[in-house]
Amino acid sequence: MTRPVLLLCQVLVAVVVIGLWHLLTTVPVLGRILLPPFFFSNPWDVGSQIYSWFASGIIWKHLGITLLESVLAFVIGSTLGVLIGFWFARQPRLAAIFDPYVKMANALPRVVLAPIFALWLGLGIWSKVALGVTLVFFIVFFNVYQGVKEVSPTVLANGRMLGMSERQLMRHVFWPSALSWMFSSLHTAVGFAVVGAVVGEYLGSAAGLGYVIQQAEGTFDVAGVFAGMFVLSAFVIVIDIFVSIVEKRLLVWKPDASNSRH
Amino acid sequence: MQAGEAATSMAVALDDATVAFGIAENRVYTAVEQATLRVADGEFVAIVGPTGCGKSTLLNVAAGLLAPASGAVRIFGQSLGGLNAQAGYLFQADALFPWKTALDNVAIGLEIAGVTRDEARARAQEWLTSVGLGAFAGRYPHMLSGGQRKRVGLAQVLIRNPKILLMDEPFGPLDAQTRQIMGNLLLDLWTKDRKAVLFVTHDLEEAIALADRVVIMSAGPGSRIIGDWKVPLSRPRDIFEVRLDKEFHALHREIWSVLKDEVMKGYAQSAGMGAVS
């Protein structure tokens, strides 16, 4: 399938779905409207809601807050994940002692922590950042831990035979290997940072996309809920494209990350 | 060549080296038993043996990556404790740093020794050129073919100018033509400043074509050195042509008559193990 044809088919899916949505919410079938607009709204209302958000500019504030929370959650979570993952991997005894607790903490659905964080950190951005951090941390932690553990023994022996000291092995072998594993989980980590931010906002806040959706739900404004979801999806896609660009630059040396010369 | 005093001048001297691994509680696998091996300075020695006979184990002992359970290892007369700093090691598997370009992979050996980055890279570029990869400096290992990776590996090891070169089936994964080209490249580089070389291979032809001496090991476990032949072929050699030499064939036949039994034994054993597990 050529690129234009593929694109056409992709657009067609959207047209069909939106068309059906429009028909079923506005045109009666056998005297009945199958999707009552009260529960399903309709594409036109949702579109005009999105337009008015952007036209009036109110949505930018919420997007900005969500973005700020996501970025902070990602940066803090991955910094902690890298440092602790690296430390644990180099100290097997420490890792063994903490192993059950790490597993326990990771098994806990993080949503239940949201009220606790709201209690501790208030309704501002930091309770959302904390929730995002708990999600991002474990992904990065496990990847970095794995990355350090799974350094090829041959590459390691080669480093030693080339005369590397422990510190040089750290810098030239363990560190790049750990970072490469972290980068390969970049999409997941960034995605979870956004999830943490939005869920946190949804459960109690005064700004952000999660707040917008929650407010609309509170007033049975279904068009607002759908509009919020569409804006959120677009937001995540934009972030994902950005992450893909960064990833491509960071992992040029990886076989699958670069499609050149192969 | 068995005299103890001669060992002091030898690049590598193993005396009755036995290597054993604990594979399970109270069970020990003896990989190599009482191996005595001498490699003189500037001598090219090839070790040939059936699969799983502990050739690589012996090499790792000479590299200091493994300590023998008993016996002595001396490098230029000095008893070896820890890694062998005089040796460069070319591994069988890919050992390049995948996150470094070919140039940085070669330069790293100098950089960690304290040479400035600019100088290390300049000299690395020279080495890449001398292994025929001058134009590939900026490529990452995965962008290179198997043969090209081996060339980078060779440059990476040789740039440090080690006195001893240890090679563990370095050309094993390559196709037949590339192996011969790599063999000639190795001989060219080696002729310039004769290092002591310990070259492990399962390919007898390759061993005879390259080496001054060919050492044969018996099938494992507890493999021993069971033969030691001098290669009478003159140097410089061309790997393509040396195989047509009459002496080459005579020696090949002679060594193969010994090696064949071991290869069959080794094969039977590994087949047997496969059936059990």
Image (tube, rainbow, N blue to C red):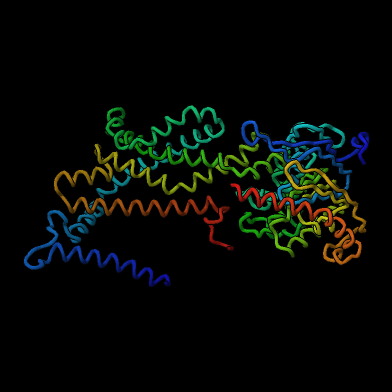
Q: Nearer the viewer, residue A114 or A126?
A: A114
- When asked about the image quadrant of residue A14, the answer is bottom left
In the displayed structure image, the side of residue A178 where residue B265 appears, left or right: right
- When asked about the image quadrant of residue B140, the answer is bottom right
Report the quarter where the N terminus of chain A lies.
Answer: bottom left
In the displayed structure image, the side of residue B159 where residue B235 appears, left or right: right
The residue positioned 85% from the left and 50% from the top of the image is B44
The residue positioned 43% from the left and 52% from the top of the image is A242
Relative to B9, does residue A44 appear above or below in the rendering? below
Residue B73 x %, y %: 81, 35
The residue positioned 43% from the left and 30% from the top of the image is A100
The answer to whether residue A160 is seen in the rendering is: yes
In the displayed structure image, the side of residue B100 where residue B197 appears, left or right: right
Residue B21 x %, y %: 68, 36
In the displayed structure image, the side of residue A104 where residue B178 appears, left or right: right
Residue A75 x %, y %: 43, 39
Q: Nearer the viewer, residue B207 or A192?
A: B207
The answer to whether residue B188 is seen in the rendering is: no
Residue B24 x %, y %: 62, 35
Q: How many numbered dots are placed on residues in this image?
A: 0
